Image (cartoon, rainbow, N blue to C red):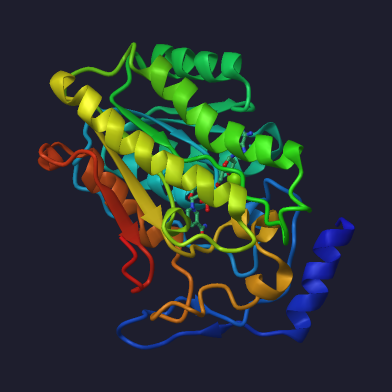
Amino acid sequence: MNKNTEKLKKNLKNQTVSIVNNPIHNTYPAPPFISQQQDAPGLVSKMIPRPDHGEQSYKGSNRLLGKKALITGGDSGIGRAVAIAYAREGADVAINYLPEEESDAQEVKELILAEGGQAITIPGDITSEAFCQNLVHNAAKQMCGLDILVNNAAHQQYSRSLAELTTESFDRTFKTNVYAMFWITKTALEYLKAGSCIINTSSVQANKPSAILLDYAQTKAAIIAFTKGLAKQLAEQNIRVNAVAPGPYWTPLQSSGGQPLEKLIIFGQQTPYGRPGQPAEIATIYVTLASKEASYTSGQIWGSDGGNGIF
Ligand code: NAD
Ligand code: MG
């Protein structure tokens, strides 16, 4: 057991997480949360409480039967919930993640395989253009095609002032959140055909930036502009482009540098629901946007923020 885990276990003994228990909020955990911090990119397996990705609850109904999807950041959090939902809707799924997240990725692989579809795991760093190109070619080759691209991976590191925000950190955030989306999407267009779609993950930060997330919020705004512009460009080819804009969701992104400890402990409290969302609560949006029934929906931003209604 490493030092970090020991610290978490000790904290767990001393603190409690309250569970919101009423018909509106279901029975999901609410703040205060246990103090916990991991190094980026963070692991689901180290989170307390463990997020719900729909492992026990998501029921598919063949809405994506035979489709082939590539999901970046598919090992954990929102991407994991989308991977599970897509597999249960009948899709083959390829996920990308960083090599240090292999244990999280293997859990997802097992869940996808349990649905009978293909589960492709492709670790690697999307801040490299060459890797992004290889990732798409590799996924499309192994699945014999590509119908759905979910650009979901992101880097989020808070910094309390502009003076503290280094060029290196700024660069990493933009490379991961914006450049990679550009490189991956460009390569994916070699495979996507009429009826295919692209779904990007933005954030409420695009519209309502936090003081401590200046670089991250900018990238999330850039994703919206990219989504809306590309939707127009690809309309002729009948390829739809949409984005999802989550509010606070309980994922490793937040406990591995995304939020300072004092904010993590009360994460989600400021929403009308009084708690963060669980990844299981957002996957259905990605399913709907990917399904053929949404054929007239493109260039849209779909928010899910616990009642604030930012989009
Ligand atoms: P997460 O940590 O589970 O997922 C982010 C993933 O990004 C990681 O699993 C990692 O695999 C991937 N990643 C980061 N850097 C990478 C790199 N260099 N190369 C390859 N992969 C890399 O967290 P999440 O919250 O599920 O994040 C998913 C998306 O949701 C992100 O776009 C995030 O900005 C967005 N989002 C999250 C919240 C929230 O509160 N959790 C709110 C708004 C938007
Ligand atoms: Mg992860």
Image quarter where ligand 2 lies: top right
Residue 80 lies, with reference to residue 263, above or below; the image says above
**Residue lying farthest to the bottom in this orientation:** 22
Q: Quadrant of the C terminus?
A: bottom left
Indicate the position of residue 51 as horizontal and vertical percent values.
53, 62
Q: Tell me the quarter of the picture where residue 54 sits.
A: bottom left
Indicate the position of residue 164 as horizontal and vertical percent values.
78, 53
In this figure, what is the number of numbered marks?
Answer: 0
Residue 173 lies, with reference to residue 265, above or below; the image says above
In the image, 55 versus 3, the foreground residue is 3
Indicate the position of residue 310 as horizontal and vertical percent values.
34, 65
Indicate the position of residue 307 as horizontal and vertical percent values.
33, 74
**Residue lying farthest to the right in this orientation:** 3
Seen at 49% across and 65% down, the residue is 248
Is residue 173 shown left or right of residue 219?
right
Seen at 53% across and 13% down, the residue is 134
Residue 115 visible in this rendered orientation of the protein: no
Seen at 36% across and 73% down, the residue is 308
Q: Quadrant of the N terminus?
A: bottom right
Is residue 225 shown left or right of residue 169?
left
Residue 241 visible in this rendered orientation of the protein: yes
Seen at 62% across and 27% down, the residue is 127
Is residue 173 shown left or right of residue 36?
left
Residue 303 lies, with reference to residue 165, above or below; the image says below
Q: Tell me the quarter of the picture where residue 298 sits.
A: top left
